[in-house]
Image (cartoon, rainbow, N blue to C red):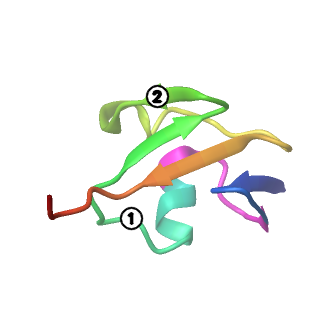
């Protein structure tokens, strides 16, 4: 299916948010996620399903000040 990840169109095979993160190399990373503009907590990623055309934002914390 095709979704938008951080503004870029991507073809993915996974159907859950956790699966998409693993497929894209963020499986073990500490990141914040938003699906279609709504925050998704880490505990809900295994059960959050994605659909064609969804918009996913993945944000990693930054250090510094």
Provide residue 58's location: percent of width, then percent of height: 49, 53
For this view, does 23 lie left or right of residue 54?
Answer: left
Query: Label 2: few (<14), some or many (≥20) within 10 Å?
Result: few
Residue 37: give x, y in percent of width and height: 61, 29
Q: Is residue 62 left or right of residue 65?
A: right
Q: Please tell me whether mark 1 or mark 2 is closer to you in this view.
A: 2
- x 84%, y 56%: residue: 1
Q: Is residue 13 left or right of residue 63?
A: right
8 or 19: nearer the eye?
8
Q: Quadrant of residue 45?
A: top left
Residue at which label 1 appears? 27
Say whether residue 15 is left or right of residue 4: left
Q: Earlier in the sequence, mark 1 or mark 2?
A: 1
Q: CA distance from mark 1 to mark 2?
A: 17 Å
Instruction: Give the residue at x 47% y 66%.
Output: 22
Which residue carries the number 2 mark?
Answer: 39
Residue 59 appears at what percent x and percent y?
Answer: 42, 53
Which residue in the rendered view is the most extreme toward the front? 65
- Name the secondary structure under disc 1: loop
Q: Is residue 22 above or below residue 52?
A: below
Report the span colored magenta: 10-18
């Amino acid at each position: 299916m095709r979704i938008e990840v951080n503004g870029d169109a991507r073809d993915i095979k996974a159907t859950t948010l956790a699966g998409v993160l693993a497929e894209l190399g963020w499986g073990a990373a500490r990141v914040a996620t938003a699906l279609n503009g709504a925050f998704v907590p880490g505990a809900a990623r295994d059960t959050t399903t994605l659909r064609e055309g969804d918009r996913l934002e993945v944000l990693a914390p930054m250090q510094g000040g």
